[in-house]
Image: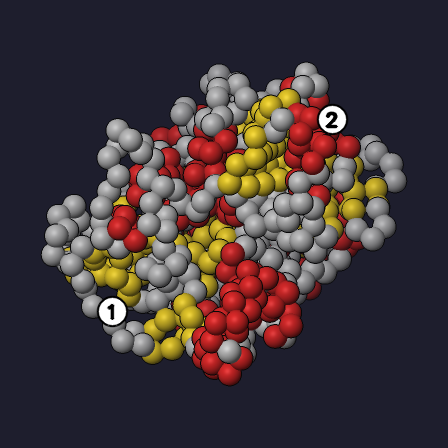
Amino acid sequence: MKQVVQNYKSGELAVLDVPVPGCKPGGVLVRSAYSLISTGTELMKVSEAGMSMVGKARSRPDQVAKVMQSVATNGVPATYRKVMGKLDSYTPLGYSLCGVVERVGTGIDDVKVGDLVACAGNEHALHAELNWVPKNLYAPVPDGLAPRHAAFGTVGSIAMQGVRRGEPQLGDVALVIGLGLIGQLVVQLLGASGVRVVGVDPDPVRCELAARLGAAACGDPASAAVETAVAELTDGHGVDQVYLAAGGGSNQPVELAARLCRDRGRVVDIGKCRLDLPWNAYYEKELDVRFSRSYGPGRYDPEYELEGRDYPIGYVRWTERRNLACFLDLVARGRVDVEPLVSHVADFDDAVETYRRLKDGELKAVAVLFRYPEYEADAEAPAVAVPAVRRSGGTPVGPAKSQVRLAFIGAGNYATSMLLPHLTGRDGVDLSTVVTTTALSGVNAQRKFGFAEATTDLDAVLGDSSIDAVFVVTRHSSHAELTRQALLAGKAVFVEKPLALTEDELAGVLAAVEESGNDRIQVGFNRRFAPLLREARKRFGARSGPASLRYLVNAGRLDHGSWYLRQGTEGTRFAGEGGHFIDTASWLLGADPVSVYATATAGGDDLQIVLRYPDGSTATLSYVTTGSPGFPKETLDLIADGKVLRLDDFVRASVYAGKRWVSSRLPKARDKGQEAELAAFVKAVRTGGPMPVPLESLVATTTATLAVRAALAGGAPVTLARAR
């Protein structure tokens, strides 16, 4: 089997072939599905291994003391051989995973072969294809919990033990210093306990993530905003507990803890930070300083961990194993959400490169998972194929000669207010025919916009060889079929969103592309053409690392009787318009999504959707209908490489980088890009050039939009697999 190892002397990382561990009594042999990289503890170990011998000594004074004692006892030569022998050996990495039980040792009766378990321990839950795990260091995974989420069990137990040491009570206010992996989990666990949380971290991306996951306020440790938030939440008394989840050599965390903690408050050290306690500050408030020892009671006790001797629940309520089971239960019930913490999923075979990217700062991550090849991913969560675009038959549509002759199918409110005003009177455009189901609506459109003809005969329009392009602006349920017919008739097609409401409808459109050779489609995803957003993107510039994008859509309630509410025929509201926002996110991030995760409120009105992208970027889309109508409809933040782009409802944009840029003045009206999109479409039809958005991207966005339904139903991320 394969295992990730490190040589502490040279710093070398490798994936070695090692023997399969035996299945001893009192434990189980587990085949790994996912294992979690601790971006704090493990990276610290990896970084130390790359130091010089002097650097190693400085970073581990405790080990230096042991060496000096050995010199006094055994002499220099013997000590040297002992130390060098230990340093020049491979050591394992990893301590948190989820996998499938492959063999059961004697004395085990709570799991069976094939069961899914979460495992803990830096000697038993390693980055390896197979691990032997003793009874008190594994816990069965609840039904419905995805293995990639169960792999957080150990770090979740560490965070949980830290919270238990703080003894929070309902109504308390807590300060969490350090918003890495452990800190983010502490924030959520405190929130689940009825505690209001203020988060502290110098990284604005991590602050934004903690706020999204429930923190009442977050900020840089040096900013006045943190102290202001604490004063407001506590009426000036200070927080009830401080949780130190930071690392590094700065003494700032313990000093900040003393300043913001209330009289006789509690300070809990979970991470590994400098602890030079300022005596006066801690003495005057009589602060209670506590340490949290790893996963909980039982840790470092060989009788508990290796021999399986449990502590009686009447005396020790929360042990390592009970903490592990409790955390898994919270995640399974949705009280803790770990999916937004997953910055990157790497194949196990790419472990060495993944560690290198993390160490060099090329991959900025909160949590990284290894995915193991032997595990069947479709046993965890559904995968949806993004259909391939094939152009094998027919004759491609050529360019128009001079005037582009357009036909409109549908002349409802959107067509007459947002599209036709930008086409009427445009040079090179001839509004030929408008097709409607009722005669009068067609006549009105003809009179107002100057169409040469109004008709109810769709076949006549599709059969008219003089018409170059067709606009499909009808109700959602007819989009795919009308697009399919227009493609087969040899027309370029502009179809308002959505392109399709089901996978079968999308397949029908692509079958028409393959049959006809006509791929001239544009879907009305106009926001990527908005001048203000394009200018902001230009000012933001290129990026080198993964990005975090947040998109809030305050969609509002629909009027009673709106055809949008006819889900039986017109699909869900999000299926109809969600592609707008997914397309915008994908355009800003420069790629198509590779997975979709979604949750909904109890009534299903509000959606939270997390999209993951190939480079580790994430986009979180909040689509809500329960907000105030007075709040802006769309707000967007893009964060990467120390830069922030902010868009406020297509009225104002700003970029915070080396120099702050703010759009100079308020526009006369919100320009969401319809005019620029139409100009690009008309130009493509006239010249025969490429469509404004590649068809492959339109298909990927449509597939991702439809996958939200599967993600909601399955309660797990849906992988978007590219069909071949």
Establish if 329 lies above or below 601: below
Depth check: give the residue in front, 367 or 606.
367
Q: For residue 511, what is the image quadrant? A: bottom left
What is the count of numbered marks?
2
Q: Secondary structure at mark 1?
A: loop
Residue at image x 38%, y 77%?
Answer: 16
Query: Would you name the residue on which mark 1 appears?
Result: 21
Query: Would you name the residue on which mark 2 appears?
Result: 228
Q: In which quadrant is the N terminus drawn?
A: bottom left
Q: Secondary structure at mark 2?
A: helix
Establish if 441 lies above or below 136: above
Q: Amino acid at mark 1?
A: Pro
Q: For residue 124, what is the image quadrant? A: bottom left
Whole-percent x and y of residue 47?
Answer: 58, 66
Taking the image as shown, residue 586 lies to the left or right of residue 379, namely: right
Whole-percent x and y of residue 670?
Answer: 74, 34
Whole-percent x and y of residue 500?
Answer: 44, 45
